[in-house]
């Protein structure tokens, strides 16, 4: 049922009680990140059982330094949509809601 609701919403159809919201996109290290990070940290500082996440390293050094030295080492997942209840704060406005929110002059210009 969830897949059908998502399919309809992505096709622009209205499904009562449901809306689309943006998915959270997780950051991941690029393949070259470990070598670059080891130029700045000891191995035990950036590895647990696996390499620490970009968010964890950012907490270690601060946002500004992270952006300057390590941001190019981060890859991101593909953003997408997820289904949420229409009354959820994450819910995106439907096309109808966005259109009706336009001032009357903008609506008649199209």
Image (cartoon, grey):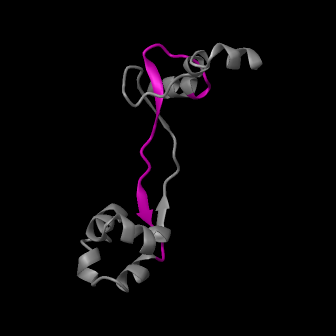
Q: Is residue 25 magenta?
A: yes
Q: Is residue 51 left or right of residue 10?
A: left
**With respect to residue 36, does 93 lie above or below?**
above
**With respect to residue 98, does 49 lie above or below?**
below
Tell me where residue 35 sits by quadrant.
bottom left
**Can you name the residue that lies furthest to the right here?**
109
Tell me where residue 85 sits by quadrant.
top left
Estimate the x, y position of residue 68 in percent, counting from the top left: 44, 72
Q: Nearer the viewer, residue 89 or 75?
A: 89
**With respect to residue 37, does 80 lie above or below?**
above
Tell me where residue 38 sits by quadrant.
bottom left
Q: Residue at x 59, y 22 (%)?
A: 95
Estimate the x, y position of residue 66 in percent, counting from the top left: 38, 69
Q: Residue at x 30, y 71 (%)?
A: 61
Q: Residue at x 37, y 86 (%)?
A: 39
Q: Nearer the viewer, residue 13 or 102?
A: 102
Q: Is residue 108 magenta?
A: no
Magenta stretch, residue numbers: 10-32
Quarter of the picture containing the C terminus is top right
Magenta span: chief secondary structure: loop
Q: Nearer the viewer, residue 24 or 106?
A: 106
Quarter of the picture containing the N terminus is top left
Estimate the x, y position of residue 55 in percent, counting from the top left: 33, 61
Number of numbered discs:
0
Q: Residue at x 31, y 68 (%)?
A: 57
Estimate the x, y position of residue 92 in percent, counting from the top left: 48, 28
Q: Is residue 3 left or right of residue 99?
A: left
């Amino acid at each position: 049922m969830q897949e059908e609701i998502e399919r309809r919403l992505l096709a622009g159809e209205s499904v009562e009680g449901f809306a689309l919201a943006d998915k959270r996109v997780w950051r991941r290290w690029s393949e070259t990140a470990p070598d670059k990070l080891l130029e700045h940290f000891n191995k035990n500082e950036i590895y647990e059982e696996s390499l620490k996440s970009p968010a964890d390293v950012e907490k270690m050094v601060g946002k500004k330094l992270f952006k300057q030295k390590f941001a190019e080492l981060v890859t991101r997942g593909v953003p997408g949509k997820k289904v949420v209840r229409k009354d959820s704060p994450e819910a995106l406005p439907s096309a109808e809601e966005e259109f009706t929110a336009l001032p009357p002059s903008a609506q008649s210009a199209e």
